[in-house]
């Protein structure tokens, strides 16, 4: 998985006043967990743009001004409810032999047979949570929809891999090919028309059957 480098400065004070001062200066207060003790640091808000404002998944190399460096992933982020500015970010430190869980995007490739036949692709899961060693974390999970027909569903069990484990239940649907609404409406209309025609034919048959005994009764009276 690709990494993004963040140049941070270790924070000596973590109180509300110092945190507010950092934000006013265009800095984002952060905490790195997963080590012997939490590491409090800050970095320029613009440094997180390639990490936060992207659909892709990345690991992070946090380089401190004291020369120390940490491999990590973003664990949580808080935004201002009005301005959407980044208020705080939590990171989790990666260790080479310790599995980590994170979300990665799903890339859909191919042209489904069902879509060609007029169906619609519904992407139920655009991101999946996987567990793996840091070196085995995928940039994305590729899903080939080419063989899927109308009515088909693709479950996470079809994406099993030896390098990582997908942390979702077996009945989780990744995508499915559904019949287009226009086609469904047309089919319903045709069914209604068929029923109407059958009903009309039945009525005509009943009327003809009723006329026959009436005619026979008239002949008998004569």
Image (cartoon, rainbow, N blue to C red):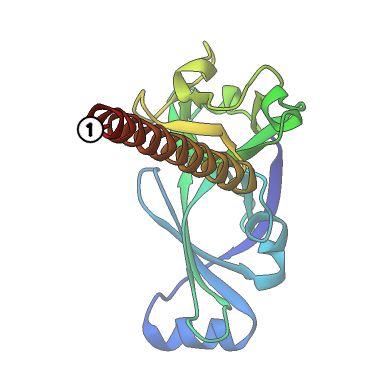
- Asked whether residue 169 appears in the rendered view, the answer is yes
Q: Quadrant of residue 52?
A: bottom right
- Report the side of 208 relative to 121 (left or right): left
Would you place residue 161 above or below residue 7 in this image? above
- Point out the residue furthest to the front here: 222
| Mark 1 residue crowding within 10 angstroms, few (<14) / some (14–19) / many (20+) | few
112 or 151: which is nearer to us? 151
- Tell me the residue that label 1 is attached to: 221
- Give the SS element for disc 1: helix
- Report the side of 32 relative to 149 (left or right): left
Q: Residue at x 57, y 40 (%)?
A: 190
124 or 92: which is nearer to us? 124
Horizontal and vertical percent for residue 80? 50, 80
- Report the side of 153 relative to 212 (left or right): right
Would you place residue 47 above or below residue 141 in this image? below
Q: Quadrant of residue 76?
A: bottom left
Quarter holding the N terminus? top right
- Asked whether residue 103 appears in the rendered view, the answer is no
């Amino acid at each position: 998985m690709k990494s993004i480098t963040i140049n941070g400065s270790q924070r000596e004070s973590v109180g509300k006043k110092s945190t507010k001062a950092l934000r006013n200066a265009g800095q984002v207060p952060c905490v790195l967990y997963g080590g012997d003790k939490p590491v409090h640091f800050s970095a320029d808000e613009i440094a997180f743009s390639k990490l936060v404002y992207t659909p892709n998944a990345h690991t992070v190399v946090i380089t401190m001004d004291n020369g120390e460096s940490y491999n990590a992933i973003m664990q949580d982020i808080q935004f201002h409810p009005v301005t959407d500015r980044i208020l705080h970010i939590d990171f989790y430190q990666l260790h080479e032999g310790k599995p980590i869980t994170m979300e990665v995007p799903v890339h859909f490739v191919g042209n489904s047979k069902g879509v060609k036949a007029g169906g619609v692709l519904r992407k139920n899961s655009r991101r999946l949570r996987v567990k793996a060693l840091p070196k085995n974390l995928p940039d994305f999970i590729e899903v080939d929809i080419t063989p899927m027909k109308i009515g088909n569903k693709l479950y996470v069990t079809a994406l099993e891999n030896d390098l990582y484990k997908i942390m979702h239940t077996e009945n989780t649907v990744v995508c499915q090919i559904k019949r287009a609404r226009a086609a469904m409406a047309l089919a319903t209309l045709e069914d209604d028309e068929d029923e109407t025609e059958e009903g009309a034919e039945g009525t005509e048959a009943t009327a003809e059957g009723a006329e026959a005994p009436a005619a026979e009764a008239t002949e008998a009276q004569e």
